[in-house]
Amino acid sequence: MNSELKKRIKTSIILLGFTIFCIFSHIGIFIIAVLVISSFAFIEISSINYRIMKNSLFLINSLCLIYLFAIFATAALSLYKLLGPSFFLYILSICFFSDIGGYFVGKKIGGKKITKISPNKTISGSIGSFLFSIFPLLIFNIFHENENLFSVNNFLFCLELSLVCQLGDLFISFLKRKAKIKDTGKILPGHGGLLDRIDGIIFAIPFAYIYTIGFSNYFKLLF
């Protein structure tokens, strides 16, 4: 195991502990965590935008600010309050497992690349992401002895959430490629920037809200 992978694993363990603490400790801590994460993500995406486009920088940054705080953060807080911390952890688990599956299966098998946008993304890795995204459903079903979570809709939810995560990852990779940078930052050892870690999550959370609560309710939530 190389040193980079060791750093990645250690950072992931710390992030997992921090995430669980913020979700289950108190809603006030959860709110602060979401706002802090959104702020760091905005700082990193602003840096990328500056490298890509300087003429329309204010407009693009304003749109990113609106998305991260009015759409992503609002959806995260609403999901938390409406469906509870356990369901929110379930959503994050799908995103995490999808990312883990893509990383390890892609590294182990390799093969044909999906796109030139991100040379490290392979078809085998994408399939691994889809397969691993189902693991949280299997795990959470164990803790719901009186309720069978296995259904077509729940399986599709895992797969669709994985797809959104992968597309979000590719989108941020596209921006990084345009900006000619490898990572969005250096805050997380072995991972790069915070946005490198949550690039799929910032798109998956609003999708999960629309999927579970409904688009009309999400529209009302925003306005």
Image: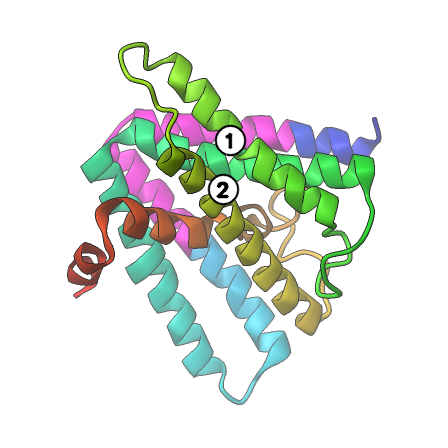
Q: Position of residue 125 (x, y in %)?
A: 70, 43
Question: Is residue 100 located in the magenta-colored stretch of the structure?
Answer: no
Q: 177 and 160: which one is in front?
A: 160
Q: Quadrant of the N terminus?
A: top right
Residue kind at label 1, given as amino acid type: Ile
Q: Residue 172: where, in percent of width, then height?
A: 58, 61
Q: Along the line of sight, which residue is nearer the eye, 11 or 155?
A: 155
The magenta segment: 10-38
Badge 2 element: helix
Q: Residues within 10 Å of mark 2 (few under 14, many from 20)?
A: many
Task: Examine the rendered structure and indicate whether residue 154 appears above or below residue 223.
Answer: above
Alpha carbon separation for disc pair 2 and 1: 7 Å
Mark 2 vs 1: CB contact within 8 A: yes
Label 1 sits on residue: 134
- Place of residue 3 in the rendered image (x, y in percent of width and height, measured from the top left): 81, 32
Q: Amino acid at mark 2?
A: Leu
On residue 159, the disc is 2
